Amino acid sequence: MQRAAALVRRGCCPRTPGPWGRSQSSAAAEASAVLKVRPERSRRERILTLESMNPQVKAVEYAVRGPIVLKAGEIELELQRGIKKPFTEVIRANIGDAQAMGQQPITFLRQVMALCTYPNLLDSPSFPEDAKKRARRILQACGGNSLGSYSASQGVNCIREDVAAYITRRDGGVPADPDNIYLTTGASDGISTILKILVSGGGKSRTGVMIPIPQYPLYSAVISELDAIQVNYYLDEDNCWALNVNELRRAVQEAKDHCDPKVLCIINPGNPTGQVQSRKCIEDVIHFAWEEKLFLLADEVYQDNVYSPDCRFHSFKKVLYEMGPEYSSNVELASFHSTSKGYMGECGYRGGYMEVINLHPEIKGQLVKLLSVRLCPPVSGQAAMDIVVNPPVPGEESFEQFHREKESVLGNLAKKAKLTEDLFNQVPGIHCNPLQGAMYAFPRIFIPSKAVEAAQAHKMAPDMFYCMKLLEETGICVVPGSGFGQREGTYHFRMTILPPVEKLKTVLQKVKDFHIKFLEKYA
Amino acid sequence: MQRAAALVRRGCCPRTPGPWGRSQSSAAAEASAVLKVRPERSRRERILTLESMNPQVKAVEYAVRGPIVLKAGEIELELQRGIKKPFTEVIRANIGDAQAMGQQPITFLRQVMALCTYPNLLDSPSFPEDAKKRARRILQACGGNSLGSYSASQGVNCIREDVAAYITRRDGGVPADPDNIYLTTGASDGISTILKILVSGGGKSRTGVMIPIPQYPLYSAVISELDAIQVNYYLDEDNCWALNVNELRRAVQEAKDHCDPKVLCIINPGNPTGQVQSRKCIEDVIHFAWEEKLFLLADEVYQDNVYSPDCRFHSFKKVLYEMGPEYSSNVELASFHSTSKGYMGECGYRGGYMEVINLHPEIKGQLVKLLSVRLCPPVSGQAAMDIVVNPPVPGEESFEQFHREKESVLGNLAKKAKLTEDLFNQVPGIHCNPLQGAMYAFPRIFIPSKAVEAAQAHKMAPDMFYCMKLLEETGICVVPGSGFGQREGTYHFRMTILPPVEKLKTVLQKVKDFHIKFLEKYA
């Protein structure tokens, strides 16, 4: 008590001008005073080391930004320092980052965001009325009419209403309830939050999470973080990466020996594999989940990215309802969407939503509680999400420009999907399935045994070795298939098709030349 | 194989106009077809229930948005529906949400944000040049010169440089390295990320995390999520909530019987307690952490919110360096800042940073890997953070207005801190320590034994009972002390001082009247 009071007194010091009024010299004086009473000792062992850290975090891997991307960063620095390379720039084809690849933002979205950010602009004649209308609606739903206030943990009410209205339109009238909508910090946040709630048990009753192989590595990373059990089901490369329910059966049966399979994750359209699931396939998957009592996670962030004229996106939610009440009132489903993909490509705003179906009311309470610890998703990202689901409609001032911009992005992506498939399939030793949707090619590459040996000598996975060589020789950064998972003895890489058409052609030509040289070198 | 191929074929359907071309009737037809082969069954048990969910998530509590806030929401709805109450509005004094309380955004920050959001505005004469300069600098550092691209997982480089420059200025020249700066999704994200890496071990070697009591409940929530061991040390209410190192010693000694104390969390200025730590106290804490080999977490988000003329903010980083190399090269420290507090109050953008000192290089790699799984913090929040650390300086066009706005916010907060302390201390049965900093009062309230019995009858903590009554009778929403932790048998509540002065006076008067009535009723 005495001592604490003394502490407080000694804490009091005459007010000095400026917030950091204290001078260095007086600081140094104090420091040396400290040193007098405390003699130098040698540097000590760290508290936080690879040995002492959380082993689950240590086990996490995330290839999309893994060693290959760190290497790309080093090479960029070398280029800046003027070090000569067989290329002049690094092309980061490792990630679906549309605007980094030169895609222009959708004007309407940015106009609404600017109006929300700096409401003085609402008086400016240089912004269209429909953009102002959207901005006013969003601001009126924000505390203090400001993007700078926290929103409700679940997200801004009127934005959740707009999301529900969008889903209802998208699904041909199947109703969506705003209370089932949770706005998120990108889709990744929603997926990891739901998994965090789902994982429980120990030993053989530890939760098993079924994921496709190849997968988007967010899933394996979160499974590691949560110390859950990863249950792989393999997509059928010989059938356009289709999901085969017999394979789901095999996987779940084998898993039951060592864990409690409780969750089934689906990515549709597929990442990295680009397939678009047929309605029949979705129906079979839902029936399987119903039979096996699995909680369904439907990652549908590429729902606007369907290119093949023979394919269409069907949401799990819609198919679930069309299968009748036995399913629609029993199967537990969470589906995810994002501002980052589609034709908007607003990755930086970290906007997204999750719709939950048949979630137990008590669990909804638990979900809101868990979300409230982080207070709320970025409100600017929520506003971006609102425009993704509530764009200009025919008759509105901005519709024509919006429609032109949207069609241009999606038209180009469709062109580039076909172009990529065709060019890869002209290369001996590369096979590429049709890019029905999403933003990536995931071609299968033949790696000669001599190259496999060379890779082993470098303690690298063969496709990592391949991608490193590709990066070092051409400046093109792609992600090895081993980062997504692939059948034993097969090799792939993931490359985004987002670069502008002309640049993409160059990239594909460079990959072709590299691959042929690679085959010769290791023949 | 056959079947999968068939699936793919059946997936193909003639292209229909519009993205969601499928009609409801055909959907209904399919639904009934499904029903024919699958007869109705009864509603089934959910997969995800309170019993089956992650018990660690179930254990999480977060009072700042807990039952009291849900009740406040219900009451607001009742008011909207015209239900009569003894008040006309709910005043949400439960959370430090400045702009929701009517605080206006700092003009310069929003101008820069608007320019970054919609770069066409860079040609507009209605924006000052210094704002355009900031915006150009940020955009040039973004992929595709757009806030819509992902940033590096650690954050935009030039913003990390600006943060490092700010820290160096703030700490009177003690150097800061941009490589040690990690931009985060608000401070909460940084704190939970570091704790996630730190927690390990099982049984008696499970990581113990020392937190102050009263604490900000993010800490207890994350400790529950991570299944770590919460180690309480009590702040000294009789000495302005000072931190007493003898109490730290007691806590760590007792903890060693059942866990491995590895982390010491400090909140300075204090939340909810509002004390500002003396330099001497910080020195003692650092020496204690050094002795006991504890990793220091310094939550310094209120570093700009110091009101008492007798107090000044000292950063742990600065004091650590002034204590000499034995400390500055050995003690592991992570400190946190945010866009949400200070005088900017930009909560909705979810911006923040973390500076790490003496973090093992391998752990830095692990940290970047873990952050990369969520790709990056919201780039708009990063931009907001840049303006917080890099505001207009004398001589710049916007300085005068910026300075006026800043001084007005901080001046008002200082006035309200004094006003709140004085008024609370006029109320019999309420004692309030000086609000030296931060944004809250945490007064101690006397609750008569009859009221304690009434609370027990309602299965409520006595201070929850008190706060519920306060809410129901006055519309004022504050958070019970039990949500932050307090010494057995003492009762408190946390109330923000953010409402405008006149409104705050009304709030304090209402609390006074309520408290007196409450004492009479339960005398």
Image (cartoon, coloured by chain):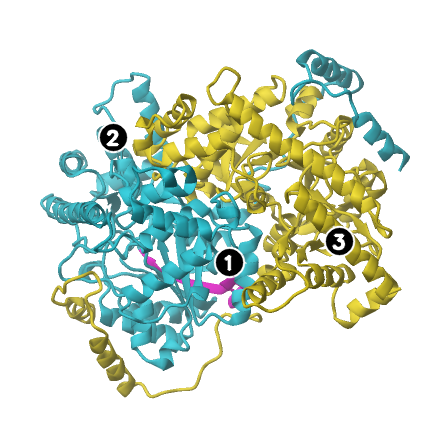
Chain colours: A yellow, B cyan
Q: Quadrant of residue A334?
A: top right
Is residue A294 or residue A149 the one in the foreground? A149
The mark that comes first in sequence, 1 or 2, is 1
Task: Calculate the distance from the C-alpha at mark 1 to the C-alpha at mark 3.
Answer: 40 Å
Q: Quadrant of residue A203?
A: bottom right
The type of residue carrying mark 3 is: Val
Q: Residues within 10 Å of mark 1 (few under 14, many from 20)?
A: many
Left/right placement of residue A217 relative to residue A280 reads left
Q: Chain of mark 1?
A: B
Q: Chain of mark 2?
A: B
Residue of label 3: A511
The picture places residue B389, in percent across and down from the top left corner, at: 32, 55
Q: Residues within 10 Å of mark 3 (few under 14, many from 20)?
A: many
Q: Quadrant of the N terminus of chain B?
A: top right
Is residue B521 or residue B353 the one in the foreground? B353
Seen at 26% across and 69% down, the residue is B172
The type of residue carrying mark 1 is: Lys
Q: Chain of mark 3?
A: A
Residue of label 2: B475
Q: Are marks 1 and 3 in contact (CB under 8 Å)?
A: no
Residue of label 1: B196
Highlighted range, magenta: B197-213
